[in-house]
Image (spheres, grey):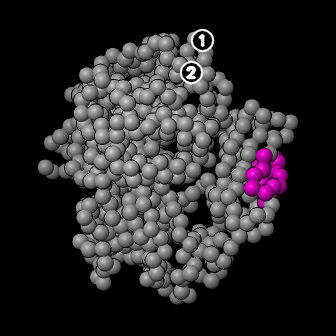
Amino acid sequence: MTLRDLPTVWGEKLTDKPLQEYPRPQLERKSYVNLNGLWDYAITKKGDLPTNYDGKILVPFSPESPLSGVNRQLKPKEFLFYRKFFTVQKGFVKDLVLLNFGAVDSICDVFVNGQHLCHHEGGYNAFSVDITPALLEKDNELVVKVRDLTDTSYYTAGKQSTRRGGMWYTPQSGIWQTVWLESVPAQYIKSIRVTPNIDDATVTVEADCTFDEPFTVIVTDGGEEIVKSDGVGSVTLRFPDGKFTLWSPENPHLYGLKLISRRDQVESYFGMRKFSVDTVGGFRRLMLNNKPYFHNGLLDQGYYSDGLYTPPSDEAMVYDIKTMKELGFNMLRKHIKVEPMRWYYHCDRLGMLVWQDMPSGGSRQNKFTTLYLPFIGVNKIKDNQYVRFSRTNKDGREMFVREYTEMIAQLYNCVSIATWVIFNEGWGQFDANKMTDYTRTLDKTRVIDQASGWHDQGGGDIKSLHVYFKKVKLPKGTLRAVCLTEFGGYSFKDGEHSFNPEATYSYKKFETLNDFNQGVKELYERDVIAQIDKGLSAAVYTQVSDVEDEVNGLLTYDRRVLKVDAEMMRVINSKIKL
């Protein structure tokens, strides 16, 4: 099988210093040293630290990706080692130096100057290491050891597969998001949690600090201070005269936020918005800022033809979001992947709602439960039958809960995230009702889709439908908002921009671009526009872009061709509203 090299326009412009932008806009410090670039790498069959390295890898691209310069798949029984030498300037150091990883897939150990400082498991969430005790005045050696079991164990892996093909994609390993240093005082602000409340015109800022002293919170608008207050642990600020600007996709207004303590200072932002579900006109509806609002979206897998999980540039992330918004969509369902924090920042500032999936895990998928039975209409199996859902391993279930908790904490301040999607199509699903209750203890401000697609346990806020191959028929009498959370999957294969010329995966194939566009138009008219007055509250078309064999994107995999007719799509989307 001949797989085609498909560079993006951003990948073609790549230098040896990729993704230099500050990676965490939701908690920003002036202290910042980006470590992305060329590192040494080695792939070995034993876990001992290597004495020799195989060559150079461009961090933060995984070795499986073309942009890494390696183009080699890490096998589940192999070990991947990274090495980077760095110096820390005297003017940079305050009291502590923190080493931050956006994400490493999926089991890693961090060594600085031979000292083991951290063990981390989970391939989607950020983590930090205090490397101060190991630092030297001159050159420092950073080594990261990685192992990735992909789909051979219960770890979260999403669509990654050691046997890629069809709806399963090339696996990723190792560092795949930005690595950077920051320096902080001994008494510093570790994290913040920002909760807007449009009903009482307030915003509450909670801070996790290494000190027990007052700090000051300042809210700004367009750079001008509008309100400030002091407190310990938590501060609630009320807008002057109770007046503020609401955030929405049509008007993505953001306020600036500063937290200042005696020794530390961080900056962030927030938007005044509210997500909820209420009864309107006899139907349960998704609400934005206390008004019914149709979530008109797309499935977004977040894969790039040259960077795979890692976007080749900041501009590449912006392109996807802006292109879909210009077509008239207002939502992206981030499908079983956690993106770099800058992606969410761009959704926040550009005005794009996000439904955030938790990446799927569990041992090898039980296709009888997750694929075959739903196809014949058996889609409500109780999910405490762990063997049916590949969740017999207790450690695996506990790991999922831990990573899910970390994900919600990491993404809580993202203005655009409207919905948490806990499980998708039964993959590694377990105890969904308990997980829904648990989610509400972590976040009371967002809507919950507990089981997207099937094996719904009756909880959460959404009756979630995946409909391919047949007409949409909405259930009656549900006490939850009815949402078409996957549909479409129509394909037109652009031969010059296809990853695999010998294989095509989609749900309905069209031989010409005209037929493809006509098919999309008729599908939306029948299954979305005609269903809104019958109670439909959201629709998620599959999908933003082609991914490897799967060619049902509105964009080609390399993002060079928009297959859907832009004006046609804008006209269709102008009719999709409540």
Asked whether residue 573 is drawn in magenta, I would say: no
Residue at the spot 69% in from the left edge and 62% down from the top edge: 209
Secondary structure, magenta segment, majority class: strand
User: Alpha-carbon distance for marks 2 and 1?
Assistant: 9 Å
Closer to the camera in the image, 400 or 262:
400
Residue 432 against residue 536 in the figure, above or below: below
Q: Residue at x 85, y 40 (%)?
A: 240
* Tag 2–tag 1 contact (CB < 8 Å): yes
> Looking at the image, which is closer to me, 88 or 366?
366
Q: Which mark is residue 281?
A: 1
- Image position, residue 154 (x, y; %): 34, 51
Residue at (54% x, 47% y) in the render: 408
Residue 18 pos. (x, y %): 44, 63
Residue 572: image quadrant is: top left
Q: Horizontal and vertical percent for residue 516?
A: 29, 26
Q: What amino acid is at disc 2?
A: Arg
**Is residue 279 visible to us here?**
yes
In x, y percent, where is residue 576?
A: 50, 20
Residue stretch rendered in magenta on the structure: 215-236
Q: Is residue 70 above or below residue 191?
A: below
Position of 459 with respect to 306 (left or right) is right
In the picture, which quadrant includes the C terminus?
A: top right
Q: Which residue is mark 2?
A: 285
Is-magenta flag for residue 218?
yes
Kind of residue at disc 1: Gly
Tell me the SS state at disc 1.
Answer: loop
Q: What kind of element bears circle 2?
A: strand
